[in-house]
Image: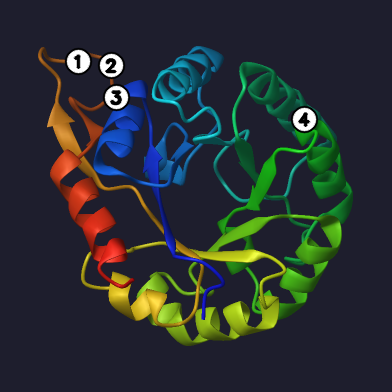
Amino acid sequence: MQSSAPAIEIAVQDVDGVGIALRVGADRVELCSALGVGGLTPSIGTIEMAVEAASVAGRPDYVNVLVRPRPGGFVYSANEIATTVRDIRAAAAAGVGGVVVGALNADGTVDTAATREFMAAAEGLTVTFHRAIDIGTEQLHVLDQLIELGVARVLTSGGAARSLDGAEVLRRMAAHAAGRLQIMAGGGVTLDSIPTLLATGIDAVHLSAKRAALSLAPSGPGGGASDFDVTDEELARAAVLAVRSTL
């Protein structure tokens, strides 16, 4: 069982998404860019405006920023780790409530040296370790490593493609964490799956609640796709209600 009411986090890609999450009553947002590749670090301008919007609403710690330097796995070079450290410091200076990070060794274990650097750069902000944990099969061992490092929260699907399929692993992770670290289910979360996921004893659910929007004008050669993701307010509100109805 959760030690407190379960939370809902919405992954958003822009300031409008932050506003929607605030309006529908989500507990926090994960701010990122490029959700189509699993999420990347958003621009500093986006971070600053998101924090300003949250602060105006009286929620200065509302924004958690994903800091991920590139797609394509979580094993990083020294330069990529250094870039991540700088981005964490910039996000902290902008006033975010937390950062979302993750780094692995080639064998799928946690890169503890890199994670320590990330923790130091975060300077006391809430640190979430993202779905890099789902790469391997030793989630409980990884939890012990992250607890020792001082990570506050982990985003995980229980090692499955969809959180619902990893529900039994999520149950074991929640029991193993025993309040020492928050377990947040993310990955393919739907409205219908929320009650089952929360019944495992996890602390929170995470979803993007997004839909595709069409550009007002053709993007043209080199402009990429003509559609882009936006936060769907109706879906976000329904997700919040689904979580609150389990109380």
Q: Residue 8 sits in which quadrant?
A: bottom left
The image's mark for residue 85 is 4
C-beta proximity under 8 Å, tags 4 and 1? no
Residue to which mark 1 is pinned: 219
Q: Residue 134 sits in which quadrant?
A: bottom right
Closer to the observer: label 2 or label 3? 3
Residue lying at 22% horizontally and 58% vertically, measured from the top left: 241
Closer to the observer: label 4 or label 1? 4
Q: Name the residue type under label 2.
A: Gly
Q: Is residue 224 left or right of residue 1?
A: left
Mark yes or no: residue 246 visible: yes
Residue 31 lies, with reference to residue 242, above or below; the image says above
Q: Is residue 180 left or right of residue 66?
A: right
Q: Position of residue 213 (x, y in %)?
A: 15, 31
Mark with earlier residue (4, 1): 4
The image's mark for residue 223 is 2
Closer-to-camera residue (177/27)? 27
User: Tag 4, which secondary structure?
Assistant: helix
Mark yes or no: residue 190 visible: no
Mark with earlier residue (4, 2): 4
Q: Residues within 10 Å of mark 2 (few under 14, many from 20)?
A: few
Residue 210 lies, with reference to residue 129, above or below; the image says above
Residue lying at 68% horizontally and 65% vertically, measured from the top left: 181
Q: Is residue 39 left or right of residue 100?
A: left
